[in-house]
Amino acid sequence: MASLCLCSSPLVTFLSSSFVHRSVSSTSLAVGPKSSTSKEVMDNMFNFDGLEEDEEEFNDPSAPRTLNDPIDIRVRNVVCNYTLPLHIDLRKVAMNCGNVTFDRGRGVLLKQMRNPHCFVKIYSSGKVYIVGCRSEAECMQAARRIARKVQKNMGRTEDTVRIRNYKICNVLATCRMPFGVRIGELAAHFPQAQYEPELSPGLIWRSQNPKCVLRVHTTGTITVTGASSEMDVQLAIEMIYPIVYQFRAPAQRP
């Protein structure tokens, strides 16, 4: 198997232990082929700008088709952050973990987890960010596993290392109404609604209670971002439903 020798590049990728050939010295690290957990992929996972209508939700045959059908809210992404009360040697952790990318230039360790599937950013200060989980429970499970892995690699197994300042900072979810929405008329009646068809096909509704942002499309698809819990997502959908119901239109089907 060919290997890539990185002598001076600040970005080093480590694959799982079964695919890595490590040759450690003071000047070089020899690793296997580059993992899919690249810096670009990780940056995109933490970027929610330009989010548009979910095509999978639009084409889902199980989506509601009559007013009596239940509305299925699907959580697509949960982002959390917390702090570990210790200084982390990122290089040491990288050498003992698989599926990681150590970016020396930015001082961050990027890791991809398989179970639960998510992406993790770890800083030497102890700050940890997790993105890509599909529920709050998965997010907490990933946080505990990362904390335990760092504790083990830092040789602190005899000490009590607690997760501090754990916070869900973003929940992204989608759903589809059993009808279309006349978003142009809706925007004309509600000044808090923002609709710029030249910039985006969706109407933006900024909710204050619960605090989140809803993007409504003419097909009836609604995307919720910025919520701090799954319950806030449900409350936001319950809040917007009677409003969009007033401007319902025949559902647009592919």
Image: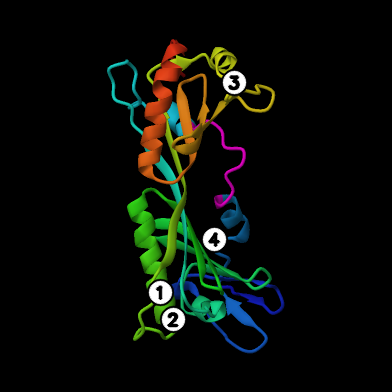
Identify the secondary structure beneath mark 1.
helix
If you read the primary sequence from the N terminus, does the residue marked by circle 1 or circle 4 appear first?
4
Q: Is residue 48 visible?
A: yes
Check residue 191 in the rendering and tell me which mark sits there, or answer none.
3
Magenta range is: 45-54
Are there few (<14), some (14-19), or many (20+) residues within 10 Å of tag 2? some
Residue where numbered disc 1 is placed: 149
**For the residue marked with disc 2, what is the amino acid?**
Asn
Is residue 156 or residue 54 the one in the foreground? 156
Residue where numbered disc 2 is placed: 153
If you read the primary sequence from the N terminus, does the residue marked by circle 3 or circle 2 appear first?
2
Residue in the picture at 46% in, 79% down: 96
If you read the primary sequence from the N terminus, does the residue marked by circle 4 or circle 2 appear first?
4
Residue where numbered disc 4 is placed: 37
**For the residue marked with disc 4, what is the amino acid?**
Thr
Front of the two marks 4 and 3: 3
If you read the primary sequence from the N terminus, does the residue marked by circle 4 or circle 3 appear first?
4
Are there few (<14), some (14-19), or many (20+) residues within 10 Å of tag 3? few
Identify the secondary structure beneath mark 4.
loop
Give percent across and percent down for residue 124: 56, 74
If you read the primary sequence from the N terminus, does the residue marked by circle 3 or circle 1 appear first?
1
Identify the secondary structure beneath mark 2.
helix
Q: Is residue 51 magenta?
A: yes
Give percent across and percent down for residue 220: 45, 21
Front of the two marks 4 and 2: 2
Left or right, 191 with reference to 74:
right
